[in-house]
Image (spheres, rainbow, N blue to C red):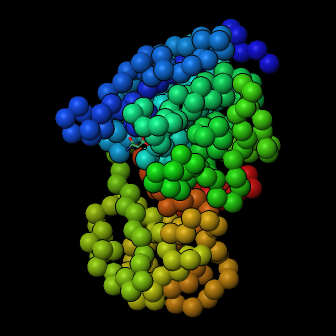
Amino acid sequence: MSLTGRSVAVFALGGTIATTADPLTGGLSPALSAEQLLRSVSGLDALGVELRVHDFRRLPSASLSLADLDALHAAIREELDSGRVDGVVVVQGTDTIEETAFYLDLLHQGEEPVVFTGAMRDATKAGPDGPANLYAAVIAAAGPWLRGAGCVVVLGDEVHAARTVRKSHTTSPAAFTSPGSGPLGLVAEARVMLHQHLPRRITGPPDTGGTAGPRPVRVALHTVAFGDDGTQLDLLDGQCDGLVLAALGAGHVPEWLVPRLRRLADRIPVVLTSRIDHGPVLTRTYDYPGSERDLLAGGLIAGGDLSPYKARLLLLRLLSTGCHDRTRIAEAFAAIGRRGW
Ligand code: ASP
């Protein structure tokens, strides 16, 4: 299929793909504009895709904020509502891309794909992957293949759903995986080849905050480690509006943490996820003090197979849009947190 005449909005936010090296120290920091990034992509002009370029931020992705993402969502909506573009590319750092893409996926209601990309190797390295990733992302955003897919991440020519994608390596150019499901498809020969049917999408709650928009809330993330004595959980008590627990195995904690977690769950939503990369938390298998059954009976909410990082963003979004009801929060996690939509 020819992409000539299709149109894509490109939002550049920074990251390794946009870095240059300091001439004295050699240290990398984001400096390149969106135009400069696109100029480095050979073959892009030949696609015939019209690009509407936005130099949106120039930051390492660790320093992007929720306010930046809300602003990005508004800017993307403006482009899509105008009917000028067939899809969107967001170019950013890979450190937080699994979270930013998921958060935008909760917000994005349109049919047009929003394709996140970046680079593991900067332009000073042998074999930088940024230009190839950007090229593949533009193809994925311009074509019809991913309509209805919501937000996806395209790196190393693979297309991953925002819901599943993880950064699984600190340096490898093949760092991105979708544990359990694998990638949705592949970009090759200027098209997307899908490996699986597009998953049914469930987006997050709409704003109910009136003109004020989402309310700032604090959701903490606590990872349980061997011998965890509860000191950190005690410090969090009273300091947050919600808590995500990255528990051991399929959702387990030392038995002496249970009274603390029950007390917390009486007051704020506490979501049970696993610190393991693959698989869901269980709900009805183990039954000892500190097991998943014990914790769920004590008021914790099952997070399905959402990673702790994505669960934190879903809880944040629910709370900031005024959803505090435990049953409704549990329903949202049952719908979005469970595989097999
Ligand atoms: N530190 C960089 C960032 O996330 C890493 C990258 O872009 O790959 O901004």
Q: Where on the image, by quarter, is ligand 1?
A: top left
For residue 60, what is the image quadrant?
top left
In front: 247, or 61? 61
| Above or below for 74 versus 291 | above
Question: Quadrant where the N terminus lies?
Answer: top right
Q: Residue sitting at 67 percent across and 79 percent down?
A: 284
Horizontal and vertical percent for residue 210? 43, 33
In front: 146, or 273? 146
Q: Residue sitting at 30 percent across and 33 percent down?
A: 21
Q: Residue sitting at 61 percent across and 52 percent down?
A: 177
Q: Residue sitting at 39 percent across and 30 percent down?
A: 18
For residue 107, what is the image quadrant?
top right
| Above or below for 290 versus 114 | below
Apparent side of residue 291 relative to residue 4 in the rendered image (left or right): left
| Above or below for 225 versus 74 | below
Horizontal and vertical percent for residue 316? 44, 51
Horizontal and vertical percent for residue 15? 39, 36
Furthest residue toward left = 24
Apparent side of residue 227 relative to residue 182 in the rendered image (left or right): left
Number of on-image labels: 0
Horizontal and vertical percent for residue 117? 53, 35
In front: 69, or 42? 42
Quick check: can you spot residue 200?
no
Quick check: can you spot residue 180?
yes
Furthest residue toward front = 126
Apparent side of residue 155 relative to residue 200 in the rendered image (left or right): left
